[in-house]
Each structure stands twice: as structure tokens, then as C-alpha cells.
């Protein structure tokens, strides 16, 4: 059903008011069925700025992993040690960890040696991060329970991808994701000529000043951090998920010659199949999250506390990824909506989580009422 101009204007006004309530710089892009409904920003530096994408970055390494599975380069049930023999140096049980486990956040390895704080302090150094994962011991058996792999997700998949392809992730992203999706303002590790476009993060006391100091350093902004380090814009995040929206519309075609921008429809449906139907909170975040094999999912929560970054009104088909409530990208096949949002301000998890939910629901509601 077409959405009226008055509904778009009303939704845009409400969304801008919500975005402005956070303060700082922000960008918001909303697309429906390929048509841009909203492309707004806070002005000033935000007009041409590149924002730290936080965990929206996981969507990119997820897509790349599924591309390689689709092509037969990787197998969903490949053990990580098949590609990375030293992965199990610290714990023989890690020989059981598969790509499937990592995609579902069930590897049992939510962090490297020293825990998440050490992960954050070394995330700019690929080799150190990899060695810390090699020496780490499992927190629980593979597949036992979802435990969000905050930074380890990207390094676990990224190291396997590097070994399987013989290529570095920034070039793979450029060839396989950025270029086909038309994303001209996204970088996995900022290049020297783009550093002046980086928007510094402002992180409130409730979340600690150390993350702000770390994220705003040049070495971090230029590092390859696949689970958190994309520098991007809301428009590019919307382009990414609009490309996936088009792939979804292929209606399940599995023919090898069927057109796809990023993933064939059958692959995308496999990637977005729910992996946790039990009402057990995530062991890392202690929140209830609907997971698929690489994406977060929308729909009604099955427990409390929870966050609904794609909106409380999103369908169970909605898929995407939240980025610490400072960024989010998603597509909902039920109503054709695609949204990309980035901000440089983090105040506190409750306020920020409610904000991204409410921005999403402005547009879900506008469609539902017209």
C-alpha cells in the first residue's frame, strides 16, 4: 500500500525530533521498496561526516561469510581449526567450534584472554587479537548458549576468511559489498585521506570515558576491526540493506544464475532463520535477543529485559544489527521498510535503546495507518 506524503512528512518530523533529543551529530535514512522516504542529518559536520558504526559492522562480516558459504569456499559446519590450526592452542575443546557456532554467537568464546576489556584495548592490533583468541579457553561448550561475541565475532570469522581467500578484509569488502551495493562512503579502517571526515564519539559517564578515548584515536579509526570498526553513513547503511531487500524479493530462487546484489534469496533466508526459540537471556548482555545466523531479528521479545532496535512494531521477519544503540541498520520484509541511522552520542543504554526503537516505530506506525 502506498504511504501518503502527509504520513511521510509527519513521520519525518517525529523522527527528527527524536534524533535531536539525543544531541550531537546524527544521520537518518529510510527507504521503502527502493524509494527514499527520509534522508536527514543534524547539519554541520554530519552532512559529510563518517560515523563509527559499532556493531552494525557485524552485518558486513556476516554477509561476506555467507557469500563464501554460498560459493562453496566455506562450509557452514567447517571447524575453525580446518582453516586455522592454531585456533585451539589454548583449549582442545575449541576443535569443535564451527562457523555455524560463531554466526549464532554460540562459539563459547565471547572474548579472548583477559576478557572484553582486554579485547577493546587490543582491537586495533589484528595479530594480538588473534593470538589472544588462540590462547583463550572456552567459557562454555560450543552451541550450548548464545553469548554475544562483542569483538571476537569479527576476528573469529575474519581470520578464517583471510585464510580461505588469501585476501585482506578491506579489499574483500570493497569488491564484494561496497561496490555492488553502491556504498561510496564506507570503510573498514579509514584511509589517510578520509580521517578528517571521522566524527568523534561522545560517550557519557554512564558508559565510561575509556571507550571514548579509545574509539577516537587514529589507530583505532584506521584499524581493521570487523565486529565494530566500520566508518560509514546512514545512507550507506540503508543502501546495504536495500540491496539485501532486493535480494529477498527474489522469492527464494535458488538457481545459480538468478540475479543477486549480495546474496541469493535462499541464502539470505537461511542466514535469517531464528536460532534461539528458548526464553534464555544472552549470557554476555543478559538481555533477550532474537538471533539468526549472523543477524539480529525483529518481532515481539520473548523475555525481559530486552531491546527492540528495529522497533516494537517490527515483524519477526525483520533483520539487521544494532550498534550499541548509537547506530542501527535493518530491513523489514513485512512492510518493505529499510533504515540506517548513525549518531556520535551515547548517553546511557536505556535512553539510547528506547530512542532507536522509537525512531523505527515512527515509520512502522506511519505505514500501518495508511
Image (cartoon, grey):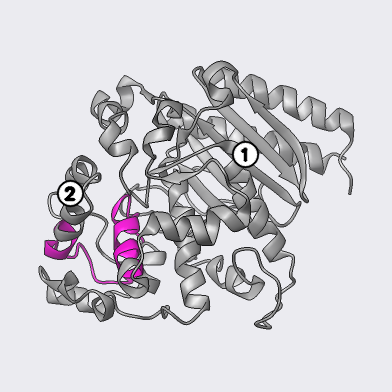
Q: Residue at x 63, y 45 (%)?
A: 238
Q: Residue at x 16, y 53 (%)?
A: 128
**For residue 175, side relative to residue 280 (left or right):** right
Q: Nearer the viewer, residue 322 or 228?
A: 228
Pointer 2: what residue?
Answer: 115
| In the image, residue 224 above or below residue 213 | below
For residue 235, which numbered disc appears in the image?
A: 1
Q: Looking at the rendering, in which quadrant would you find the C terminus?
A: top right
**For residue 176, side relative to residue 12 (left or right):** left
Would you call the spot at circle 1 few (<14 residues within 10 Å), some (14-19), or many (20 or more)?
many
| In the image, residue 140 above or below residue 215 | below
The location of residue 182, given as percent across then percent down, is 63, 50
Would you call the spot at circle 2 few (<14 residues within 10 Å), some (14-19), or many (20 or more)?
few
The answer, for residue 324, to whether it is visible in the render is: yes
Q: Residue at x 30, y 79 (%)?
A: 79
Chain part drawn in magenta:
132-161
Amino acid at each position: 500500500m502506498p504511504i501518503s506524503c502527509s504520513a511521510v512528512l509527519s513521520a519525518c518530523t517525529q523522527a527528527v525530533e527524536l534524533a535531536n533529543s539525543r544531541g550531537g551529530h546524527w544521520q537518518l535514512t529510510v527507504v521503502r521498496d527502493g524509494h527514499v522516504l527520509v534522508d536527514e542529518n543534524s547539519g554541520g559536520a554530519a552532512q559529510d561526516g563518517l560515523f563509527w558504526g559499532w556493531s552494525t559492522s557485524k552485518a558486513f562480516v556476516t554477509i561476506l561469510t555467507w557469500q563464501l558459504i554460498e560459493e562453496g569456499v566455506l562450509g557452514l559446519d567447517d571447524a575453525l581449526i580446518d582453516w586455522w590450526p592454531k585456533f585451539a592452542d589454548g583449549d582442545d575443546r575449541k576443535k569443535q567450534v564451527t562457523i555455524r557456532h560463531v554466526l549464532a554467537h554460540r562459539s563459547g568464546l565471547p572474548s579472548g584472554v583477559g576478557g572484553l576489556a582486554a579485547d577493546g584495548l587490543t582491537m586495533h592490533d589484528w595479530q594480538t587479537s588473534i593470538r589472544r583468541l588462540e590462547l583463550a579457553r572456552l567459557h562454555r561448550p560450543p552451541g550450548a548458549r548464545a553469548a554475544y561475541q562483542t569483538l571476537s565475532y569479527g576476528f573469529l570469522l575474519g581470520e578464517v576468511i583471510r585464510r580461505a581467500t588469501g585476501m585482506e578484509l578491506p579489499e574483500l569488502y570493497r569488491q564484494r559489498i561496497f561496490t555492488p551495493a553502491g556504498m561510496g562512503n564506507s570503510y573498514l579502517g579509514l584511509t589517510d585521506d578520509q580521517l578528517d571526515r571521522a566524527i568523534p564519539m561522545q560517550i557519557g559517564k554512564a558508559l565510561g570515558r575509556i571507550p571514548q578515548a579509545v574509539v577516537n584515536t587514529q589507530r583505532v579509526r584506521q584499524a581493521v576491526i570487523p565486529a565494530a570498526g566500520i566508518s560509514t553513513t546512514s545512507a550507506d547503511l540503508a543502501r546495504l540493506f536495500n540491496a539485501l531487500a532486493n535480494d529477498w524479493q527474489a522469492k527464494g530462487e535458488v538457481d545459480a544464475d538468478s540475479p543477486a546484489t549480495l546474496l541469493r534469496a535462499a541464502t539470505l533466508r537461511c542466514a535469517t532463520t531464528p536460532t534461539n526459540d528458548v526464553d534464555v537471556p544472552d549470557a554476555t548482555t543478559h538481555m533477550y535477543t532474537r538471533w539468526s545466523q549472523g543477524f539480529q531479528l525483529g518481532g515481539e521479545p520473548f523475555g525481559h529485559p530486552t531491546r527492540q532496535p528495529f522497533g516494537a512494531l517490527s515483524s519477526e521477519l525483520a533483520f539487521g544489527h544494532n550498534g550499541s544503540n548509537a547506530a542501527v541498520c535493518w530491513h523489514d520484509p513485512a512492510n518493505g521498510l529499510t533504515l540506517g541511522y548513525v549518531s556520535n552520542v551515547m548517553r546511557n543504554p536505556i535512553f539510547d535503546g528506547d530512542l532507536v526503537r522509537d525512531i523505527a516505530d515512527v515509520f512502522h506506525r506511519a505505514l500501518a495507518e495508511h
